[in-house]
Amino acid sequence: MFALRTGASGLQSFGEAMSVVGSNIANVNTTGYKANRVNFQDLLATGVAGTTTKVGKGVKISSVQGDFSQGSAQSTTRLTDLAVEGDGFFTVRTNTGRTFYTRAGNFELNKDGTLVTDKGATVLVREIDRLTGELKEPLTGARLDKITDPPQATGNGANDTGVHVAANLNTEAEVPQLQFDPTNVKAEMYNFSHAVTVYDERGAEHVVTVAFRRVADTPPQIDPATGAAIPGTGRQNQWQWYVLAPESEFGGNPEAVRAVGGGFLKFDEKGRLLEATGGRFTAPGAGQVGPEGQVIPPGPPVLVEAPLPAGAPVPQVTLPFADNPLVLGLSFGRGSNPNDPNDPRTGLDGITAFASEFKVSRMDADGYKPGTLEDFDITVNGTIMGRFDNGNNRPLYRMMVSRFVNEAGLLRAGDSLFEQSLQSGQPLNGHPAEGGFGTVAVRNLERSNVDLSSEFVRMIETQRAFQANAKSVTTSDEMLADLVAMKR
């Protein structure tokens, strides 16, 4: 009698189904767990004697499908607890070189400071070039310990680098009586100054001072033929600027201060910057004249106007360090041209010369000293940002996520890991928040997507089905017993 085998197939199938239900219930609190569902299928049919009708010979489990729906998020306090919100799996690699995929983001740092799973598999990322922002190949682990941020020197003015100055110079200030001596600068030689920290290529800090000295006004020259003033020959509301540094910076007398460079600032009658130019120091001597043909008087070197270096967008000065001179760019504003109605510049975005107090609203320099990683954070797009003790925040790594055309075809490998198979297809690799991939939630874990109430219903259904099949077996047994008894 086939009824016995039919019932036996039901007992076997529903016994296995109960193990799947039990596994779901057992993993109700497993991070990133995806529930399974049993699909049943009838066995090969057989005919019924005296009819053309065919009936099944029992039941079997055709497949066990995974439910990859999103689990709820559970907030935590650990920075390395991560959850994928949306499509995608974290990609990890074991010590044996095998690649797996997981939704369980309960990661940690191992003894080397590398981001790993709780079983030690390395979380795969792409390293980011800290200066260009480009992603590097190949995939690697996120090493988050003993990282150094290399120093960067203060710029020469290219690409908006260097020293930026925004201040007001009091146009009512008097011209200093003491002649400016760049070889031995005294405070009485200028009207106003402000210090700024710059950095050399080794990351060493150097404090320099930007000083401003008012230039005496001169009336315009008179055309003897007409008796009228010659335009552009007078000098009104002009200032000199200097970069000062202690002689100790260059191996000299620590008590002395030197001017390493300077230039001129020209303003209109309203106090708006027209132009910032460079300059050079010219020592007095026979035949030495300034750019306007003026004779250089006896005394210390005199600052005369000089064109900007070729290709330089702003004035520059050189700090003559013995090992490696540092070229500084100084931006005082874009200037303006009031004679051109189409000039969009205002002359107000940098330094001005109004009849009000000396005041600095901005004087800073780029560049920085070397830094050591203090902490890190992870953004929603999977970028691991490093915070260094030199004040810089740098992108270090970009997390890697993978998805599959057929997630249900993934093989379960234990430890909340999945492995690709022929049914799942090849992984589609990408980054969080791009190309349909999910985002990363920091200090969150994805909980199991097991619905406990549904699992209890399935348990009852499976139990009753098992009981019914057991009854089918016992009934078939009784029928066989009756058949045997007929012989007596």
Image: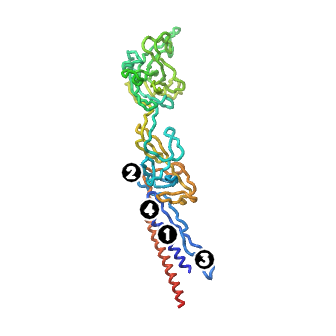
Mark nearer the N terminus (4 vs 2): 4
Tell me the residue that label 4 is attached to: 27
Q: Is residue 471 above or below residue 487?
A: above
Q: What kind of residue is marked 3?
A: Thr
Q: Is residue 300 above or below residue 378?
A: above
In-front residue for pair 95/431: 95
Residue 379 % position (x, y): 46, 46
Residue 20 % position (x, y): 48, 66
Q: Tell me the quarter of the picture where residue 180 sits.
A: top left
Is the residue under label 3 in contact with that under label 2 (CB below 8 Å)?
no
Is the residue under label 1 in contact with that under label 2 (CB below 8 Å)?
no
Q: Is residue 65 above or below residue 12?
A: above
Q: What kind of residue is marked 4?
A: Asn
Residue 394 % position (x, y): 46, 40
Q: CA distance from mark 3 to mark 1?
A: 25 Å
Mark nearer the N terminus (4 vs 3): 4
Task: Report the side of 11 relative to 249 (left or right).
Answer: right
Q: What kind of residue is marked 1?
A: Glu
Tell me the residue that label 3 is attached to: 46
Q: What kind of residue is marked 2?
A: Thr
Residue 350 % position (x, y): 45, 28
The answer, for residue 355, to whether it is visible in the render is no
Depth-wise, is mark 2 or mark 1 nearer the camera?
Answer: 1
**Label 3: few (<14), some or many (≥20) within 10 Å?**
few
Tell me the residue that label 2 is attached to: 77
Q: CA distance from mark 1 to mark 4?
A: 17 Å
Q: CA distance from mark 2 to mark 1?
A: 39 Å
Which mark is drawn over residue 16? 1
